[in-house]
Amino acid sequence: MTITDQPTLMLRAATDADDLAQVQQLCWEYRSHLMQNSPIDAKLTETFYPDPVYRQLMEDLPKLHARPGGVILLASLGGRAVGCGMTHALSPDTAEIKRVFTAPDARGHGVARALITALLDQARADGFSRAVLDTSVNLGPARALYTSLGFRERGPYQDIPEDVLPHLVFFEALL
């Protein structure tokens, strides 16, 4: 019988150009995943993040999620970038979690759970009293993860077009 070592999961703040490039690549993979996940998710992605808007968003990530009100985390497994997640301030008491993604070949190693936990810990340390996020109704594993980490479903926390509301689920966790 052969015992194999599990690769080591590491999280770090993405602050230098190399880390940010890896996060941007993972974000593009996330967008591609959503475009292929379901016709509804493709429509939602194109509605909120058409290609030119997403390109600009990727350029602006370091500003949008800058300390002290936000953070960008990069997860690596065995030294390879496999996941990301980020926060930014919505208000003095509320942090929003965005773009949590784990590469498909790294799923099952606790990457997303570690990212969400670290994002919540950082938001708490930064003085926020709650964290919010939204996801597609079609992303069942993500919804189950958020619930298992203490999030509860809630209504929208910002203006969302009525026609897309049935396709999104909104969550909140008190810190």
Image: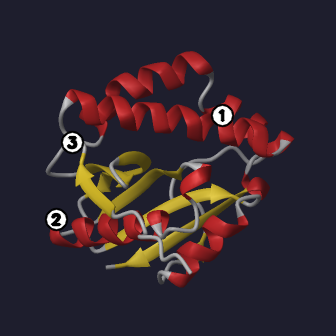
- Mark nearest the camera among 2 and 1 is 1
Mark 1 or mark 3, which is nearer the start of the sequence? 1
Q: Residue 65, percent across and down? A: 28, 43
The amino acid type found where label 3 is placed reads Ala
Q: Residue 80, percent across and down? A: 38, 46
Q: Quadrant of the N terminus?
A: bottom right
Query: In the image, what residue occupies the spot 75% across and 47% down?
Result: 164
Question: Which quarter of the figure has residue 24?
Answer: top left
Query: In the image, what residue occupies the spot 54% across and 69% down?
Result: 171
On the rendered structure, is 73 left or right of 161?
left
On the rendered structure, is 69 left or right of 172?
left
| Residue indicated by mark 2 | 126
| Residue indicated by mark 3 | 66
Q: Quadrant of the C terminus?
A: bottom left
Question: How many numbered marks, from 0 up?
Answer: 3
Residue 32: mark? 1
Circle 3 SS class: loop
Disc 3 crowd rating (10 Å Cα; few below 14, some 14-19, many 20+) is: some
Disc 2 to disc 3: CB gap under 8 Å: no
* Coloring applied to the structure: secondary structure
The amino acid type found where label 2 is placed reads Asp
The amino acid type found where label 1 is placed reads Ser
Query: In the image, what residue occupies the spot 33% across and 33% down?
Result: 61
Circle 2 SS class: loop
Q: Residue 142, percent across and down? A: 61, 65
Circle 1 SS class: helix
Mark 3 or mark 2, which is nearer the start of the sequence? 3
Mark 1 or mark 2, which is nearer the start of the sequence? 1
